[in-house]
Image: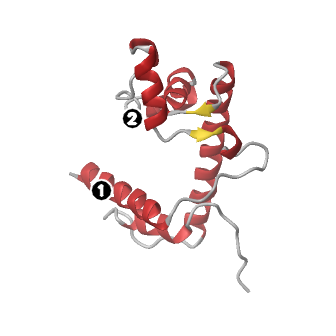
């Protein structure tokens, strides 16, 4: 009897993304499950650190700026610095511009952020499909 593992990220999609790489042949059944769990732990760590940054700034919403500051200050996330390089710093903008940025960005209310067992609401099917498409496109671009 197979054991069912509950993961927060879709194992089938992880397997498909892994198989986009031509160097990857067959994938053991446990591999996508382990990748899913590792991704879950990584995201939890990133969000926890970003929540700390948000609380330090006495903000009510977690924004892209908080994630950028977290990535720049925590050594564990150094590999993401080039990803957040294009996110504008609020100190370089005027107050009205930073308010507009906060309202336009994908800000997440603090109540929705996973903290001590709470979970974020799930994304729509279209948003999930778009996210997977972006990952696949990035994988193809890296191959070239």
Indicate left or right for 2 with 64 as reference: right
Whether residue 89 is visible: no
State the CA–CA distance, disc 2 to disc 1: 15 Å
Q: In the depicted view, which residue is nearer to us: 135 or 101?
A: 101
Image vertical order of residue 139 relative to residue 14, above or below: above
The kind of secondary structure element at disc 2 is loop
Could you tell me residue 142's position as x and y percent? 28, 49
Q: In terms of image quadrants, where is residue 37?
A: bottom right
The kind of secondary structure element at disc 1 is helix
Q: In the depicted view, which residue is nearer to us: 64 or 38?
A: 64
Indicate left or right for 109 with 101 as reference: right
Q: In terms of image quadrants, where is residue 110?
A: top right
Locate the N terminus by quadrant: bottom right
- The extreme right residue here reads 116
The residue carrying mark 1 is: 137
Q: In the depicted view, which residue is nearer to us: 46 or 35?
A: 46
Q: Which mark is residue 72?
A: none
Q: Which mark is residue 83?
A: 2
Q: How is the image coloured?
A: secondary structure
Q: In terms of image quadrants, where is residue 20?
A: bottom left
């Amino acid at each position: 009897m197979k054991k069912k593992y509950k993961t927060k990220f879709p194992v089938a999609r992880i397997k498909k993304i892994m198989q986009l790489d031509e160097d990857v042949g067959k994938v053991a059944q446990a591999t996508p499950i382990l990748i899913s769990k590792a991704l879950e732990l990584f995201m939890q760590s990133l969000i926890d650190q970003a929540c700390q940054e948000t609380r330090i700034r006495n903000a009510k919403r977690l924004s892209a700026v908080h994630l950028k500051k977290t990535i720049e200050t925590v050594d564990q996330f150094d590999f993401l610095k080039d990803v957040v390089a294009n996110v504008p710093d609020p100190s370089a903008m005027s107050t009205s511009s930073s308010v507009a940025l906060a309202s336009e960005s994908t800000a997440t209310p603090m109540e929705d952020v996973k903290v001590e067992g709470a979970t974020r609401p799930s994304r729509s099917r279209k948003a999930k499909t778009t996210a997977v498409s972006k990952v696949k496109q990035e994988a193809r671009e890296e191959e070239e």
